[in-house]
Image (cartoon, rainbow, N blue to C red):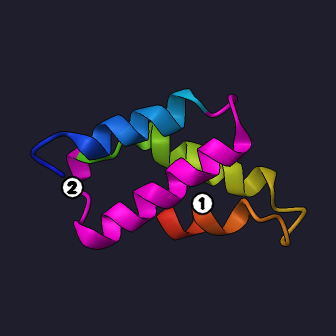
Amino acid sequence: MKEEGVFPRLIELIYERKDDDVGLHRMLLELLYEMSRIQRLRLQDLNDDFIRYLFQIIEGLSDDVNDPYHYPVIRVL
């Protein structure tokens, strides 16, 4: 997956499509998590903006701990 550049493309999709469809966005996050369990992410696959974006999602949803969106984001982090 690393050789094909799958991780950077998936991160790009997650970051660019954040306003499209919540269900699709959550599924992309879950896919990223499952892929990272199979093969570890490299530092160059991640960027600071993406990590900050994930923390902003958690902070934005911090009022509702029962929100099903919480868990996929936390697992990716």
In the picture, the disc for residue 73 is 1
Magenta stretch contains residue 23: yes
Per the image, label 1 sits on a secondary structure element best described as helix
C-alpha gap between disc 2 and disc 1: 18 Å
- Percent x, y of residue 68: 76, 65
Counting residues from the start of the chain, the first of labels 2 and 1 encountered is 2
Magenta stretch contains residue 1: no
Q: Residues within 10 Å of mark 2 (few under 14, many from 20)?
A: few
In the picture, measured across the screen, residue 77 lies left or right of residue 56, that is left
Taking the spot 22% from the left edge, 45% from the top edge, the residue there is: 44
- Percent x, y of residue 51: 48, 49
The answer to whether residue 46 of the structure is visible from this angle is yes
Considering only vertical position in the picture, is 77 above or below 53?
A: below
Taking the spot 24% from the left edge, 52% from the top edge, the residue there is: 43
The magenta segment is: 18-44
Q: Are marks 2 and 1 in contact (CB under 8 Å)?
A: no
